[in-house]
């Protein structure tokens, strides 16, 4: 978000594996993160890190661009019609 607008930049959707550790105060901190390799090893990595049910949902997790924009506006407290600008 910048100046009351969503800022859309390039990116990709890769399912990460994040390992968390609980802090003394009850919060969490990231202790490790893995992402699938690009290219030929992607399918094997995905099969080794996710169950069949989870794996089948990975392609649909991002949703449509309109749904993502709606969710982003709500997350940042922007009005429904807030513009979407390029980086």
Image: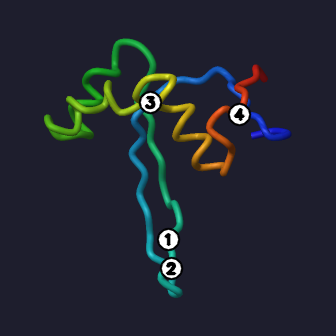
Residue at the image point whose x is 50% and y is 79% from the top: 23
Report the front residue among 69 and 38: 69
- Residue at the spot of label 3: 14
Separation of marks 3 and 4 at Cα, in angstroms: 27 Å
Who comes first in sequence, dot 4 or dot 2?
2
Q: Earlier in the sequence, mark 1 or mark 4?
A: 1
Q: Residue at x 45, y 19 (%)?
A: 38
Instruction: For mark 3, give the secondary structure.
Output: loop
Q: How many marks?
A: 4
> Which of the 4 quarters of the picture holds residue 80?
top right
Residue picked out by circle 4: 82
Q: What is the secondary structure assignment of the residue under circle 1?
A: strand
Mark 3 vs mark 4: give the one in front.
4
- Foreground mark, 1 or 4, reads 4
- Label 1 to label 2, Cα distance in Å? 5 Å
Residue 73 sits in quarter: top right
The first of marks 3 and 1 along the sequence is 3
Whole-percent x, y for residue 9 in the image: 69, 24
Labelled pair 3, 4 in contact (Cβ < 8 Å): no
Give the answer, above or below, for where 15 lies relative to 74. Answer: above
Disc marking residue 23:
2
Label located before the other in sequence (3 or 2): 3
CA–CA distance in space, label 1 to label 4: 33 Å
Question: Which residue is labeled 1 in the image?
Answer: 28
Distance between mark 4 and mark 2 Cα atoms = 38 Å
Relative placement, left or right, of 33 versus 81 is: left
Q: Quadrant of residue 36?
A: top left
Could you tell me if the residues under marks 1 and 2 are in contact, i.e. CB atoms within 8 Å? yes
């Amino acid at each position: 978000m910048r100046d009351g607008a969503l800022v859309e930049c390039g990116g990709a959707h890769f399912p990460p594996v994040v390992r968390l550790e609980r802090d003394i105060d009850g919060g969490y901190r990231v202790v490790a993160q893995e992402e699938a390799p690009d290219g030929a090893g992607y399918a094997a990595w995905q099969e080794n890190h996710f169950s069949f049910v989870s794996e089948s949902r990975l392609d649909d997790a991002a949703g449509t661009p309109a749904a993502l924009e709606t969710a982003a506006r709500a997350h940042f407290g922007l009005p429904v019609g807030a513009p979407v600008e390029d980086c």
